[in-house]
Image (cartoon, grey):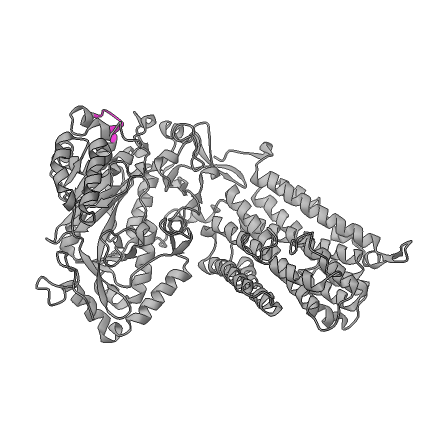
């Protein structure tokens, strides 16, 4: 059932004899039980389903598709005993303290360089050394609040440091998701083995940041992300939600008077602490990279003024260089008066002539790494190179010695993984985190993120197709039961502090609503059109004219397609071709097709993913992916079968109904949600007003099938026939589709809802929103007899001038409202309303 570890690698599953299980794995198997071991495939299936359902993703650069894909998580955790963890914990705490002291020196007295304990080329010569930070003292006196260390377990049982991350370490969100997912599969073992929990460390980090931030306990903390296209965006949103932080991008923030502010619907609100997931060089386009669209102009000036705690402080890139590891033992003796308790792998920086000469003959047994990670140079494992390749590498190192560092090769310990029928060992690396819990004080998160190399490969890297595992640490005592959900002294104050809605989030929520409504309208209209175009009874010219006009208006077909009156077959084929979201597809007909709108809906949702439940996000993702797949299946059919198209539209309609339910019933009614609702109803008012106006122009309401088609587009067929049976006159139609304030598809209901949403926005966002409501038509002034009345036109046709005028007013008012909301809330064109929060 299990395969032993490869020769030369530590086997974490077996004991020293190599025949029995290790003590920890014996406990695990005992608590899982015989029945549990026989049930591993079901548990693994549940685990992978949970990862998919929670929307846990990671973008692999090596993936040619460039698409985010489900996070790879193995069923079995790595198990660590008390002795192993004691060694790791002591070593990591010592190193966190040392690296923080080094940062203070590098941007202060630079004693390490002056005493030649660290080569100047690895400091001032490093592209990540920020001269703009020279002389800066960070708020709270702590430079590094989150430090990650990559550890390897050697064949001799010793733990070795092979790398460290200080700029924007990733993994804190993924390891938390790993813990929750894996612990659910083995609840008995997790409890019985007294695995130390994680929440207290996250709480300590937040408490530590607040204790050092300028505003103390009342500090507003945000998490800065590069955005949804970053490979680890999922964990940015996950961490922000778990820690109760505002997730922000660079353009959500602005600097005024050497202070940092968040752009919200209410104006500018202060930010006192920022946890960054953006590398240093992108933080401030004024002083660092001028081409950065991820940072905040003037951010470094805010730091120098002491008005912001930034975790971590900028400028730590030199500490991430592999070359630094070789100098740390001497630096530790100098700065701490201590030997390093957790050793680094032997490391040679080739910029020193003696080190280069020493390491060149050893390349076959080493790992060649770039000295400066941002240089773009590759990493090579010596034993995977042939003699010619080794000579080529040696030549490059001789020509540019400063650019290369060589590290000794260490066979990684191998931990058991489940493949579906047996246990297979895979090489593993453990990333552990030191979190600052106060000034000059850190604690180690108990556990970490395990990265697993693909079977048969030497490197454990997520970017190279690796996977992950949880890490369980045996406490050897009591389990800490701290929870971030526990009440705190400031809970009452927090209850009165509403979550801010950033202008960027508000804009994306607004368009999330519009694209949801636009997709629903497109799907409903396409179904109505195909149903009438392919029906057994021939449709009237009036109905065909209306279908052609409304399809063009809603971008379901291109304007140059022959109208349905000219060729029903050609028009139907063009309509089905226009459903596709892919501009390169032979089916593609419009940049605003149903498929385009579903994809745009997903893109808007991606920008506000931290505000959506996993179920809501999954519905959106599946609606887009499934419709695209259905369109590809249709492309294989030269006849573009109507049956297949109708089935695809039916499936999309059901998904959109569920998405609408999630938006209506499962989102908090804050200002962001109100803008989402406003977006939906603006779109509904424009579409329905225009559709009814075109129906009047084409006189399709005079035809029974045309009358039914218009009622169906308003999604009111059942209600109409329940109220009016088989009557098809203008009084009945205007009463239900225009005047009825209980019908969510009537124009009066839409207008009164928009007015109500704007009134609420004026209380929570800006007073100007109430003024915007005045630009909408007033349903109280609408009179049924006037709107349903008609006059005889000179050509003999009946006209409904009062109703047509109202429909034109509704469409124009909705378009104007969209422009005004954009100006007021998204572009901040009206600077008079801007205020600075206290």
Q: Is residue 708 magenta?
A: no
x, y percentage for residue 260?
Answer: 44, 33
Left or right, residue 284 beside residue 598 = left
Residue furthest front in the image: 388
> Does residue 77 lie above or below 405 as drawn?
below
- Marker count (numbered): 0
Quadrant in which the N terminus is drawn: bottom left
Res 347 → quadrant: top left
> Does residue 509 lie above or below 54 as drawn?
above
- The part of the chain drawn in magenta is 104-110
Task: Let me know if residue 743 appears in the view.
Answer: no
Left or right, residue 668 beside residue 11 = right
Residue furthest left in the image: 17
Res 276 → quadrant: top left
Residue at the location (33% across, 71% down)? Answer: 42
* The one of 503 and 46 positioned closer to us in this rendering: 46
Residue at the location (61% across, 38% down)? Answer: 823
x, y percentage for residue 762?
Answer: 61, 44
> Does residue 118 lie above or below 704 as drawn?
above
Left or right, residue 712 beside residue 184 = right
x, y percentage for residue 326?
Answer: 16, 37
x, y percentage for residue 27?
Answer: 18, 67
* The one of 601 and 458 positioned closer to us in this rendering: 458
Left or right, residue 699 beside residue 321 = right
């Amino acid at each position: 059932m299990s395969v032993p570890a490869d020769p030369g690698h530590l086997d974490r599953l077996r004991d020293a004899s190599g025949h029995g299980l290790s003590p920890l794995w014996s406990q695990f198997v005992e608590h899982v039980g015989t029945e549990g071991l026989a049930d591993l495939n079901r548990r693994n299936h549940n685990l992978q389903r949970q990862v998919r359902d929670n929307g846990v993703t990671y973008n692999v650069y090596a993936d040619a598709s460039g698409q985010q894909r489900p996070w790879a998580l193995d069923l079995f955790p790595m198990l660590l005993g008390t002795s192993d963890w004691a060694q790791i914990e002591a070593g990591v705490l010592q190193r966190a303290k040392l690296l923080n002291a080094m940062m203070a020196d590098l941007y202060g007295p630079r004693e390490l360089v002056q005493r030649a304990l660290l080569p100047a080329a690895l400091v001032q010569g490093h592209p990540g050394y920020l001269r703009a930070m020279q002389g800066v003292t960070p708020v709270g006196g702590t430079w590094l609040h989150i430090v990650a260390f990559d550890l390897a377990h050697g064949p001799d049982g010793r733990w070795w440091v092979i790398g460290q991350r200080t700029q924007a370490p990733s993994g804190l969100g993924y390891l938390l998701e790993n813990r929750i997912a894996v612990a659910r599969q083995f609840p008995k073992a997790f409890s019985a083995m007294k695995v130390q929990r994680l929440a207290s460390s996250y709480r300590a980090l937040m408490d530590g940041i607040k204790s050092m931030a300028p505003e103390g306990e009342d500090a507003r903390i945000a998490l800065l992300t590069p955005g949804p296209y970053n490979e680890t965006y999922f964990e940015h949103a996950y961490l922000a939600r778990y820690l109760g932080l505002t997730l922000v991008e660079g353009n959500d923030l602005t600097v005024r008077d050497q202070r940092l502010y968040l752009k919200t619907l209410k104006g500018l609100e202060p930010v006192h602490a920022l946890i960054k997931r953006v590398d240093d060089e992108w933080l401030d386009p004024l002083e660092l990279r001028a081409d950065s669209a991820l940072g905040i102009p003037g951010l470094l000036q805010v730091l120098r003024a002491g008005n912001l705690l930034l975790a971590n402080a900028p400028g730590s890139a030199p500490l991430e260089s592999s070359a630094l590891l070789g100098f740390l033992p001497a630096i530790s003796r100098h700065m701490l008066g201590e030997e390093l308790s957790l050793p680094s792998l032997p490391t040679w920086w080739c910029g020193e002539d003696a080190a280069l000469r020493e390491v060149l003959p050893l390349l076959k047994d080493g790992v060649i790494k770039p000295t400066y990670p941002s240089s773009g140079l590759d990493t090579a494992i010596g034993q995977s190179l042939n003699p010619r390749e080794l000579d080529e590498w040696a030549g490059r190192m001789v020509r540019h010695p400063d650019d290369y560092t060589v590290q000794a090769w260490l066979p990684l310990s191998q931990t058991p993984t489940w493949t579906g029928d047996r246990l297979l060992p895979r090489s593993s690396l453990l990333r552990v985190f030191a979190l600052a819990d106060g000034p000059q004080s850190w604690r180690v998160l108990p556990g970490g993120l395990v990265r697993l190399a693909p079977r048969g490969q030497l490197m454990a890297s997520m970017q190279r197709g690796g996977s992950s595992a949880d890490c369980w640490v045996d406490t050897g005592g009591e389990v800490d039961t701290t929870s971030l959900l526990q009440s705190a002294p400031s809970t009452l104050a927090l209850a009165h502090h509403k979550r801010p809605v950033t202008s960027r989030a508000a804009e994306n929520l607004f368009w999330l609503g519009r694209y949801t409504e636009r997709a629903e309208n497109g799907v409903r209209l396409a179904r109505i059109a195909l149903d009438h175009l392919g029906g057994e009874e021939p449709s009237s010219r009036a109905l065909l004219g209306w279908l052609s006009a409304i399809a063009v208006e809603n971008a379901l077909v291109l304007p140059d397609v022959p109208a349905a009156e000219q060729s029903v077959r050609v028009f139907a084929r063009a309509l089905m071709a226009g459903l596709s979201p892919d501009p390169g597809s032979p089916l593609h007909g419009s940049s605003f097709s149903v498929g385009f709108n579903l994809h745009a809906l997903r893109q808007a949702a991606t920008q506000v993913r931290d505000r959506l439940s996993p179920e809501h996000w999954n519905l959106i993702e599946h609606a887009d992916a499934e419709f695209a797949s259905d369109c590809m299946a249709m492309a294989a059919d030269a006849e573009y079968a109507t049956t297949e198209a109708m089935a695809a539209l039916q499936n999309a309609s059901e998904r959109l109904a569920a998405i609408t339910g999630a938006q209506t019933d499962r989102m908090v009614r804050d200002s962001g949600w109100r803008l989402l609702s406003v977006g939906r109803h603006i779109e509904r008012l424009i579409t329905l007003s225009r559709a009814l106006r075109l129906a009047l122009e084409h006189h399709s309401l005079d035809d029974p099938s045309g009358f039914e088609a218009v009622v169906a587009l308003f999604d009111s067929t059942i209600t109409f026939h329940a109220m009016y049976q088989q009557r098809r006159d203008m009084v009945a139609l205007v009463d239900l589709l225009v005047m009825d304030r209980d019908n969510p598809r009537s124009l009066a209901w839409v207008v009164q809802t928009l007015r109500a949403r704007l009134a609420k926005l004026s209380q929570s966002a800006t007073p100007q929103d109430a003024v915007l409501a005045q630009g909408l038509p007033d349903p109280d002034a609408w009179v049924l007899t006037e709107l349903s009345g008609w006059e005889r036109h000179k050509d003999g046709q009946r006209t409904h001038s009062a109703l047509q005028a109202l429909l034109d007013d509704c469409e124009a008012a909705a378009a104007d409202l969209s422009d005004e909301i954009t100006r007021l809330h998204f572009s901040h064109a009206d600077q008079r309303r801007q205020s600075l929060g206290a």
